[in-house]
């Protein structure tokens, strides 16, 4: 029968991929708990109106990329293309603002966008999102960028840089929009068809178009930073002062516009070398109008989302290997030994060791072969003789052939002995 394949742009993450993913996710969880952020999990499916209203009808995401369909009751639902709108919906639905004046939230999970798949771009991809609701002060912007910076540092991501811009507010952005429309109208012949079409609807997006002609046309475009109102300019200066204080290097990027309509003031991205066109590892910014737009009281907020697929790709390209606990493999020579091995494995696992055996219960040769293929560090061999004497034969699979490669040791206190042995090898490996 013909095999069924996964959907284009949606991929399987296989066991061999997972250690790096778990390392990235574990690092995120650990870091965010140290910043005292709380996890939130929202549904993958939301009413379509949430994203149409939240992200903006004119954005590429809403206009072209959403997985939207009528469910069996005829309601229009959408697989979430991002997490900010959902987090804000949940924040309002459960009155989180009443519980705390300041809410620090994070989420991690799959997002869906029907984009053209390419390197680093998938139709199902994974984001770590971080949101801070309830603070208008530039200290909140600094905290957010600091989290992103620390995340990159904790992962030892190389060749990444923070890009920073401000998109102003309802007072100063319309004037900038007009200036942009005027500027690009004089160069409309150089723009790609998409930008020609969006020039009047969404002129800011022309600035970050990747098409060569548009990039050239944008070179002399006016900068938002030159058009900020006094309040937005003061806010931006304060954010920069905080970043300087924290020693976070950043590049001012006049073309950093972001693809979602909810942004106000500070926007930022983490860009990486070596990812090709899809070089944004994370992006975010302030969205002071979104809570109100979704039916809440005016509430300032800021956040970012990091693309985990891209981070894992970068780490793999850097040759990073996720640390894994050494494996202990139990080999049993006959039926009685297999029974005894079950209890032994239980004890060792309860003591915190990673333990496996070959449940096909084949020959010693095939059990040892599997131990080898699984990359086990130690084999514990149990047979008639070991059972009779209350011992196990311990074989160091990583050691070269030598007298102490294999030894008979008492079963009593075995977990401590194994720990000792593993630590010994680590220190041996560290010897110059
Ligand atoms: P975004 O810039 O659309 O922002 O996405 C954030 C990150 O998700 C990107 O920098 C990228 O690493 C990753 N990403 C986006 N699309 C794809 C894709 N098709 N394949 C792989 N990775 C992708 C947001 O989603 C905002 N909600 C961020 C935010 C949170 N702003 C405020 N709070």
Image (tube, grey):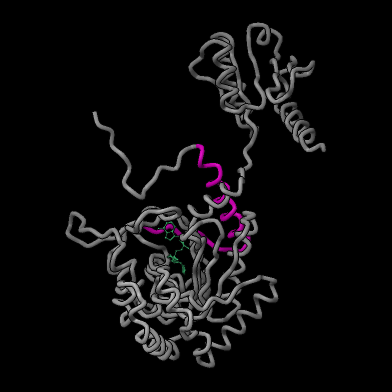
Say whether residue 70 is left or right of residue 147. Answer: left
Magenta stretch prevailing secondary structure: helix
Q: In the rendering, at what x and y percent does residue 238 appear?
A: 62, 83
Q: Residue at x 46, y 74 (%)?
A: 98
Residue 82 occupies quadrant: bottom left
Question: Is 150 placed above or below 379 here?
Answer: below
Q: In the rendering, at what x and y percent does residue 336 appear?
A: 56, 9
Q: Please give the range of residues in magenta.
A: 16-43
158 vs 423, nearest the viewer: 158
**Extreme right residue here?**
432
Q: Where, quadrant-wise, is the N terminus in this rendering? A: top left
Q: In the rendering, at what x and y percent does residue 70 appear?
A: 20, 58
Question: Is 6 placed above or below 141 here?
Answer: above
Q: Residue at x 60, y 79 (%)?
A: 239
Residue 170 occupies quadrant: bottom left
Q: Is residue 397 magenta?
A: no
Say whether residue 131 is left or right of residue 55. Answer: right
Q: Residue at x 46, y 60 (%)?
A: 278
Evaluate whether residue 404 shows in this view. Answer: yes
Say whether residue 304 is left or right of residue 160. Answer: left
Evaluate whether residue 91 shows in this view. Answer: no
Q: Is residue 28 magenta?
A: yes
Q: Where, quadrant-wise, is the C terminus in this rendering? A: top right
Q: In the rendering, at what x and y percent does residue 22 appear?
A: 54, 46
Q: Residue at x 66, y 27 (%)?
A: 377
**Extreme bottom residue here?**
230
Q: Which quarter of the rendered image does ligand 1 occupy?
A: bottom left
Question: Is 107 placed above or below 23 here?
Answer: below
316 vs 54, nearest the viewer: 316
Instruction: Report the number of numbered marks.
Output: 0
């Amino acid at each position: 029968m013909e095999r069924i394949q996964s959907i284009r742009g949606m991929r399987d993450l296989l066991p061999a991929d997972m250690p790096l993913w778990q390392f990235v996710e574990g690092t995120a969880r650990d870091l965010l708990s140290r910043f005292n952020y709380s996890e939130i999990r929202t549904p993958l499916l939301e009413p379509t109106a949430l994203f149409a209203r939240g992200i903006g009808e004119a954005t590429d995401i809403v206009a072209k990329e959403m997985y939207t369909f009528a469910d069996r009751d005829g309601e229009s639902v959408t697989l979430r293309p991002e997490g900010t709108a959902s987090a804000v919906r949940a924040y309002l639905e459960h009155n989180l603002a009443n519980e705390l004046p300041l809410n620090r939230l994070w989420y991690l999970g799959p997002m869906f966008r029907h984009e053209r798949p390419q390197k680093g771009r998938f139709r199902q991809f994974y984001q770590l999102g971080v949101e801070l609701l309830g603070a208008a002060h530039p200290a909140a912007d600094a905290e957010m960028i600091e989290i992103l910076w620390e995340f990159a540092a904790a992962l030892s991501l190389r060749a990444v840089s923070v890009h920073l811009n401000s998109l102003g507010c309802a007072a100063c952005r319309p004037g900038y929009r007009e200036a942009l429309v005027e500027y690009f109208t004089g160069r409309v012949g150089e723009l790609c068809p998409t930008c020609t079409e969006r020039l009047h609807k969404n002129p800011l997006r022309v600035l970050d178009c990747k098409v060569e002609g548009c990039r050239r046309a944008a070179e002399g475009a006016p900068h938002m930073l030159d058009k900020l109102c006094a309040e937005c300019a003061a806010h931006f200066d304060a954010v920069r002062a905080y970043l300087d204080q924290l020693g976070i290097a950043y590049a001012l990027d006049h073309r950093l516009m972001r693809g979602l309509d909810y942004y106000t003031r500070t926007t930022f991205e983490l860009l990486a070398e070596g990812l090709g066109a899809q070089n944004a590892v994370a992006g975010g910014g302030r969205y002071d109008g979104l809570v109100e737009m979704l039916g809440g009281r005016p509430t300032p907020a800021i956040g970012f989302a990091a693309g985990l697929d891209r981070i894992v790709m970068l780490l793999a390209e850097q040759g990073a290997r996720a640390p894994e606990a050494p494996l202990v493999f139990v080999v049993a020579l006959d039926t009685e030994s297999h029974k005894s091995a079950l209890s032994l494995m239980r004890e060792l696992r309860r003591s915190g060791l990673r333990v496996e055996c070959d449940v096909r219960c084949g020959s010693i040769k095939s059990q040892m072969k599997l131990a080898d293929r699984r990359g086990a560090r130690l084999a514990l061999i149990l047979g008639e003789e070991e059972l009779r004497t209350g011992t196990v034969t311990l074989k160091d699979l990583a050691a070269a052939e030598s007298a102490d490669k294999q030894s008979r040791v008492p079963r009593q206190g075995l977990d401590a002995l194994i720990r000792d042995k593993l630590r010994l090898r680590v220190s041996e490996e560290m010897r110059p």
